[in-house]
Image (spheres, helix red, strand yellow):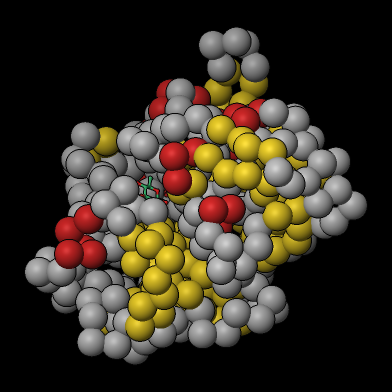
Amino acid sequence: MLGCKEEAKNEIHSVAEAKSSVTQSVYAVTSEGEEVYKYSLINTKGMQMEVITMGGAIISLTAPDRDGKYEDVVLGYTTPDLYLNGNPSYFGAIIGRYGNRIAKGKFTLEDIDYQLPVNDEVNHLHGGKGFDQKIWKAKIISEDEPSLKLSYTSIDGEEGYPGNLNVTVIYTLTNKNALEISYEADTDKTTIINLTQHSYFNLSGNFKTILDHNLELKADRFLTVDSTLIPTGELRYVAGTPFDFTTAKNIGKDINADNDQLVIGKGYDHCWIFNNTVKHMKEVAGLYHKESGRYMTVYTDQPAIQFYSGNFLDGTLKSKKQGNYEKRSGLCLETQHYPDSPNQKEFPSVVLKAGELYKTKTIYEFSVK
Ligand code: BGC
């Protein structure tokens, strides 16, 4: 009975404009006795999003198919414990201070050498025990255009990074079925920053595979990587390679191609450089699931995107739908700066100084085709 109710809640058909809302409830309590809250946002079209204060993680997000059927399009765990104890796949979470990898966890800033924790073989990944594992403060900004502000202060030295960093992330579920994510941060000491969002999308409504999705990336070049997924420094043209998504391409088409670069990451786990790197909002990517008609457009002011095809999902995590999450049952489109930028002088700067404001925005907009 309960199961039916849950499903009915998440999978409503679009109705005439309804009242939007944001509601709060207690989601779970950590072993230290701290409460983790859940916020449920609903827009006037009936699109829903659930966010928890642990990691600012989006645990569900619905989008309509071409018949107006709203279904969950982001992967998540079925119980709170994995969100509370390390979020091993970074499902839906805010990633920081530095999304993606820093070689050997080392970098030098203003003549000071820093050593960050090494948590991905020989490298530092996603900020170590990063923002995905912190409890954020939440404040409802608006119920008319459902909007939630999350804040977190990362103290000087946390996970080895310099400077007290105040971060805010605002999630807005617009009444045009777009999820807008606005990030801001400031520091009291020179530091590095590269924030992103780690939702795994699957537009099918069943979370089985993303190999039947089509992807378009407005990027003529990508970063080649070494065997530990650190950029070699080369910006290679995608033309004639499996990395060419300049016109919409089926993700499954080349994924098993005999290409060294795809073997290294066990599939796509690379950073594409947008043709337009000017720091203003631009359309950068499109994801399409033909059967359902669901289409997701990505806009950002960031210079690059990590397209990760869920290669390390291994069938051990239970799906919110049927069965388990198999390899490639979801994909991430993480807008960001280039990986390992602090060590690669030619890459755009990720340095944030005291008195400066880090400000960036990404939009995931849902429609049908
Ligand atoms: C990275 C992958 C990593 C995954 C973890 C992605 O952002 O690019 O290499 O395995 O996050 O979920």
Q: Quadrant of the C terminus?
A: bottom left
Horizontally, residue 271 falls left or right of residue 150, namely left
Q: In terms of depth relative to the viewer, which is nearer, 352 or 138? A: 352
| 112, above or below 16, in the image | above
User: Does residue 112 show up?
Assistant: yes
| 329, above or below 240, in the image | above
Write down the quadrant of residue 79 in the picture: top left
Horizontally, residue 332 falls left or right of residue 190, namely left
Q: Quadrant of the N terminus?
A: top left
Write down the quadrant of residue 318 in the picture: top left
Q: What residue appears at the point 33 percent right and 35 percent down from the top-left corner?
A: 121
Q: In terms of depth relative to the viewer, which is nearer, 321 or 119? A: 119
Horizontally, residue 187 falls left or right of residue 307, namely right
Q: Position of residue 281 (x, y in %)?
A: 66, 78
Q: Position of residue 135 (x, y in %)?
A: 64, 30
Horizontally, residue 224 falls left or right of residue 126, namely left
Q: Position of residue 239 (x, y in %)?
A: 29, 87
Toward the right, the furthest residue is 355
Q: In terms of depth relative to the viewer, which is nearer, 328 or 123? A: 123
Q: Position of residue 40 (x, y in %)?
A: 61, 45
